[in-house]
Amino acid sequence: MGRKWANIVAKKTAKDGANSKVYAKFGIEIYVAAKSGDPDPEINGTLRLVVERAKQAQVPKHVIDKAIDKAKSGADENFTAKRYEGFGPAGSMIIVDTLTNNDNRTVANVRTAYNKNGGNMGNSGAVSYLFDNKGVLVFDGEDGDAIFEQLLEAEVDVDDVEAEDGIITVYTAPADLHKAIEALKANGITEFKVSELEMIPQSEIELTGEDLEQFEKLIDVLEEDDDVQKVYHNVAFED
């Protein structure tokens, strides 16, 4: 799984780096995180994690600073977090997390994306019970056992540590992701390929042919929507 996560982030970073839509989405997420707590990333753990993810996606510093300054200014633009669940081609399962200032627009766009690309939107909870919410950290390293011990000593709730091809992947309880990052930084690990809260499928399926093409189009349409922040699914792609 370590190599898989590293490949996913490499592909996504290459795509994100040239995508101004991604800058705008991170700007909203940073603004919401800064507005909901302290606008200082050193104090606000949620904001700090979003900023780290933005840097991984090559979001320019001025975009990050502008979003934080907007929150500091007392701007009253309100965004609501919404989750939509449904099914893609061949029984694939998809979860869509959004931040929106217009619920009607967002739900209509997400439903249309499903319907026009071989899927259908379900009710809340339709598929999320088949996913596990975990913190995921990926970084360069060889000794997974040593990392596991370091995290246990820091009293981090660790689900698993995997080491593969020079890549270490750490899975934590969602609430302990920040604690894990700080514990690893205290042990000299400061660069992360992935530092995310993820919805991880309990099992994956493989798609081929037209089903795969239609599924990939559905994911692309969802991710292109301005209100969509994250898309999770249970389809296995080759590393």
Image (cartoon, rainbow, N blue to C red):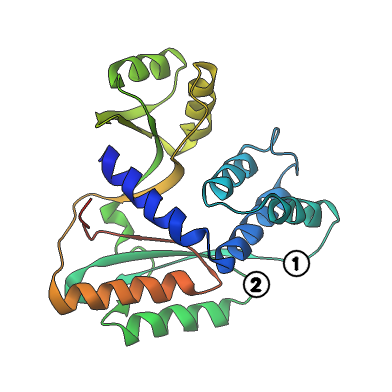
Q: Is residue 212 left or right of residue 226?
A: left
Q: Residues within 10 Å of mark 1 (few under 14, many from 20)?
A: few
Calculate the distance from the C-alpha at mark 2 to the C-alpha at mark 1: 8 Å
x, y percentage for residue 88? Answer: 26, 74
From this view, report whether residue 10 is shown above or below residue 120.
Answer: above
Dot 2 crowding, Cα within 10 Å, few <14, some 14–19, many 20+: some
Q: Which residue is situated farthest in the right direction here?
A: 73
Q: Quadrant of residue 221?
A: bottom left
Task: Give the secondary structure at mark 2.
Answer: loop
Among the two numbered marks 2 and 1 on one chain, the one whose residue lies closer to the N terminus: 1
The residue nearer to you, when weighing 13 against 92, is: 13
Q: Where the N terminus falls, by quadrant? A: top left
Which residue type does callout 2 highlight?
A: Asn
Residue with the mark numbered 2: 101
Q: Position of residue 231 (x, y in %)?
A: 40, 62
Residue denoted by label 1:
77
Look at the numbered discs 2 and 1 and tell me whether their residues touch, using CB distance below 8 Å. yes
Which residue is located at x 38 percent, y 72 percent?
Answer: 220
Amino acid type, callout 1: Glu
